[in-house]
Amino acid sequence: DWTMAAFKQQAIEKIRAQVGKGRVICGLSGGVDSSVVAALIHEAIGDQLTCVYVDHGLMRLGESEQVVSVFRDRFNINLVHKDASELFLGRLAGMTDPEQKRKTIGALFIDVFEEEAKKVGGADFLAQGTLYPDVIESVSVIGGPSVTIKSHHNVGGLPERMNMKLVEPLRELFKDEVRALGRELGLPEEMVGRHPFPGPGLAIRIPGQDITRDKLEILKKADAIYLEEIRNAGLYDAIWQAFTVLLPVRTVGVMGDSRSYDYACALRAVTSTDGMTADFYPFDMAFLGRVANRIINEVKGINRVTYDVTSKPPGTIEWE
Ligand code: XMP
């Protein structure tokens, strides 16, 4: 894509002009925006960039490993992978209120990020994946739980506190342009085309109950099977977001000759253009039956699968 190639070159020159010989720190989340920012800045200034990936233990199956292998091993980027799952899960223990979970995770995230940034000796600049829609107005703050969207990613106050200036090379771009730029930079399609994922991660997909490592393992496995089936059916790109929710209820079932008493889960898939409104995805029943069978047979701990047919409004995309 000629336009994107030209944009990339311009952006690289701007970054070099702004940063000079300074040092830049970038928080990676595994999402599209921060991935593209990191790859772009790395192409501009190489080892003057350090990325920090704060792993809260609430990512999907294999995702943290993928971030590390792409950025550290393939792109050769200086990357700090901070496994902070003990800390996050410890702090979340016994917590069931959605907003309390969000605030706890958001605040802890900033603390850990700051600590890691200090450990690598700080930096002159903080890189952020701010997009054009964020610049013109915070559209994402309207409606429901997403009010706190900004509180997680926004490392608010940090640049001033650590005396850093901002580098925001995506400020002129819309999401689809960010994806095109990511492809131009050689990021894997799986990363560039990835569905949105909430900052608090799987913590808000274990609604109304205590978050434990056991439940996270169960949820991750079921979710991986669901997403694998969606990809195999060629439906991934037609869907805005798809995920599994581990329900706070156990149900009775029969497994062979014996009775089971395990968790129920809900599958969610929606189409949307901006996340503000959404329609449930009309899978065919054979597809849903196949996913349900696989989850129940392959995931110990789940014996019932339901499909969520609520659109937004009146529902939200996430369950909490
Ligand atoms: P809802 O559930 O409000 O979600 O319909 C709309 C979009 O926002 C995402 N979402 C979040 N993203 N932190 C985030 O970074 C959050 O706390 C949060 N809550 C919801 C959701 O996945 C969907 O894309």
Image (spheres, rainbow, N blue to C red):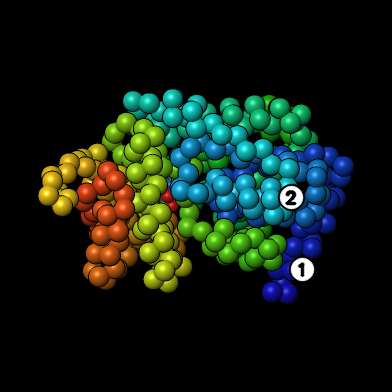
Residue 313 visible somewhere in the drawing: no
Q: Residue furthest bottom?
A: 2
Instruction: Check the image and report above or below for 87 versus 189.
Output: above
Q: Is residue 180 left or right of residue 196?
A: right
Q: Which residue occupies 24% across, 43% down?
A: 263
* Residue 16 placement (x, y as % from top left): 83, 51
Residue at which label 2 appears: 76
Task: Write the residue at 43% across / 66% down.
Answer: 231
Q: Is residue 302 left or right of residue 124?
A: left
Frontmost residue, 296 versus 128: 296
CA separation, marks 1 and 2? 24 Å
Residue 89 image offset from top left, x and y in percent: 44, 29
Quadrant of the frame with the N terminus = bottom right
Of residues 176 and 117, the one drawn nearer to the viewer in this rendering: 117
What is the residue that sits farthest to the front in this orientation?
257
Quadrant of the image occupied by residue 281: bottom left
Could you tell me the amino acid type at mark 2?
Answer: Asn
Answer above or below: position of 22 versus 91: below
Q: Amino acid at mark 1?
A: Ala
Of 87 and 315, the residue lying toward us = 87
Q: Position of residue 246 (x, y in %)?
A: 30, 44
Q: Which residue is mark 1?
A: 6
- Residue 270, by quadrant, is bottom left
Q: Is residue 176 above or below residue 295?
A: below
User: Mark 2 falls on what kind of element?
Assistant: loop
Residue 237 seen in this snapshot: yes
